[in-house]
Image (tube, rainbow, N blue to C red):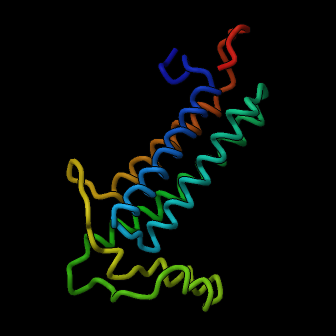
Amino acid sequence: MSLLHSISKRRVNLFGFIICASLIGAALYLQEAGHEPCPLCILQRVAFISMGIIFLIAALHNPAGRICGRIYGVLIAIAGTVGAIIAGRHVWLQHLPPDQVPECGPGLEYMMEVFPLTEAMQMVFKGSGECAKVSWTFLGLSIPGWAFVLFVTLAVVGLLRNWAYRERSNAYSIL
């Protein structure tokens, strides 16, 4: 039995929620410390919040059946994939040569108020000069690089653990 399958679904989902909540807390701390988020950073936060909510609901529900567990796994994987795509685009913008970086544009709030949703999203995904700025690195990866790694890891773990049917039986444990 693998390590992942030796831990209950509820614990894995609860741990996934705690990771997502911690990441949002860290992002808010960085924002308070002066690192203003760009539009792609904000969308990555939305993806982490979405994943966290799905992990929390899956932990609270703790479905015994195969179908519900698989639905949670797929929803977690979808949220993680969307987040990974956004983070990947952000990393790509950060690695563009300086002469190819798009000019800075309006903020996300302004774009959502003034433009139709589809046009605003197109503008966000084009990126801007502020999205290409690297303000922090750890072990050679920027914040969007780490976000990409975490999106992929959480999506894979959430999908694999919730997809599995067999659950270890421990009638005395609530976690």
Which quarter of the image is occupied by the C terminus? top right
Residue 164 sits in which quadrant?
top right
Which residue is located at x 49 percent, y 84 percent?
A: 123
Which residue is located at x 47 percent, y 44 percent?
A: 22
* Residue 136 image offset from top left, x and y in percent: 25, 59
As drawn, 131 above or below 114: above
The total number of labels drawn is 0
As drawn, 3 above or below 107: above
Which residue is located at x 52 percent, y 46 percent?
A: 20
Left/right placement of residue 155 relative to residue 134 reads right
Which residue is located at x 55 percent, y 21 percent?
A: 5
Residue 73 sits in which quadrant?
top right
* Residue 6 image offset from top left, x and y in percent: 54, 17
In this view, the residue in front, 38 or 25, is: 25
Identify the residue at the far bottom of this view.
Answer: 114
As drawn, 115 above or below 79: below
* Residue 76 image offset from top left, x and y in percent: 61, 46
